[in-house]
């Protein structure tokens, strides 16, 4: 099973709402990532988890809060977002952070619209 | 910091060969990956070069010259389904930094 799943596929939320994005993989990968991708742009790294611990936060605003409950799951909690946060949010995983980050498996993404 | 340059768009016909170039400037370089992303889809890993030279995977090949800070992706026997965006990505200090992407349009 080389699949990364993400829910929901689409999400529309107001600026005062709280919502969560979920990501799951069952490949035994120990590194998981959140990326943000705007239309016609490359994915931009937000967070890296390695062995369930946050190892990299690319100066992401605190209205985005990641969580890794176990080695298979990754959440992204959203609160008080701005319209400019509307984007495709991609989750990815790799076997580990340091040796295999060149080969990441991406989920299909959650398309987020903030109104 | 890291910066990568690749052409924004390339067009070709079915059956042709196309080369997508990537030049990079980075502090801390471990290798160069290539990803494909169809419109509305997820990025998919294609290939990785850590050392100089050519890596071949079916119709796709990737090349790296570390001394020139340059790499390319070669796609042979182009098919319509190859129409997609192609990203080069530098691996440094455990993270991937993507180039801006090259949109490949394959016509009949």
Image (spheres, coloured by chain):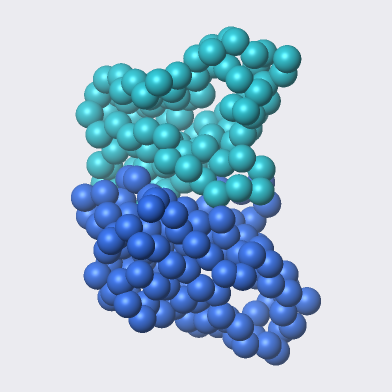
The number of callouts visible is: 0
Which residue is depicted at the point 53% across and 65% down?
A: A6
User: Which quadrant holds the C terminus of chain A?
Assistant: bottom right
Q: Position of residue A104 (x, y in %)?
A: 38, 50
Which residue is depicted at the point 55% across and 74% down?
A: A21
Q: Is residue A91 above or below residue B60?
A: below
The cyan-tinted chain is B
Q: Is residue A83 above or below residue A80?
A: above
Find the residue positioned furthest to the right.
Answer: A115
**Depth check, front residue: A73 or A63:** A73
Q: Is residue B48 above or below residue A5?
A: above
The hue of chain A in the figure is blue
Q: Seen in the image, is A113 located left or right of residue A37?
A: right
Q: Position of residue B94 (x, y in %)?
A: 28, 55
Which residue is depicted at the point 66% across and 43% down?
A: B39
Q: Seen in the image, is B97 located left or right of residue A12?
A: left
Q: Seen in the image, is A90 located left or right of residue B50?
A: right
Query: Do we see residue B67 in this rendering?
Result: no
Which quarter of the figure has residue A10? bottom right
Find the residue positioned furthest to the front.
Answer: A1
Which residue is depicted at the point 52% across and 37% down?
A: B36
Which quarter of the figure has residue A53? bottom left
**Depth check, front residue: B21 or A73:** A73
Q: Position of residue A73 (x, y in %)?
A: 39, 73
Query: Do we see residue B6 in this rendering?
Result: yes
Q: Is residue A92 above or below residue B16?
A: below
Q: Position of residue B56 (x, y in %)?
A: 34, 21
Q: Seen in the image, is A69 located left or right of residue B66?
A: right
């Amino acid at each position: 099973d080389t699949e990364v799943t993400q829910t929901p596929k689409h999400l529309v939320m107001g600026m005062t709402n709280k919502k969560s994005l979920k990501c799951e993989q069952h490949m035994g990968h120990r590194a998981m990532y959140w990326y943000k991708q705007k239309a016609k742009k490359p994915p931009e790294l937000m967070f890296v988890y390695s062995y369930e611990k946050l190892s990299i936060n690319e100066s992401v605003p605190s209205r985005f809060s990641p969580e890794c409950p176990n080695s298979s799951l990754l959440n992204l909690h959203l609160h008080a977002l701005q319209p400019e946060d509307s984007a495709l949010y991609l989750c990815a995983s790799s076997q580990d952070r340091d040796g295999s980050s060149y080969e990441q498996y991406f989920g299909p993404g959650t398309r987020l619209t903030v109104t | 910091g890291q910066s990568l340059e690749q052409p924004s768009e390339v067009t070709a016909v079915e059956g042709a060969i196309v080369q997508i170039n990537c030049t990079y400037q980075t502090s801390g370089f471990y290798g160069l990956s290539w990803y494909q992303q169809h419109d509305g889809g997820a990025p998919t890993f294609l290939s990785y070069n850590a050392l100089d030279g050519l890596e071949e995977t079916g119709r796709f090949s990737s090349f790296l010259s570390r001394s020139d800070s340059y790499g390319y992706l070669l796609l042979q026997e182009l098919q319509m389904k190859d129409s997609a965006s192609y990203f080069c990505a530098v691996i440094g200090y455990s993270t991937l930094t993507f180039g801006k992407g090259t949109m490949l349009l394959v016509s009949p």
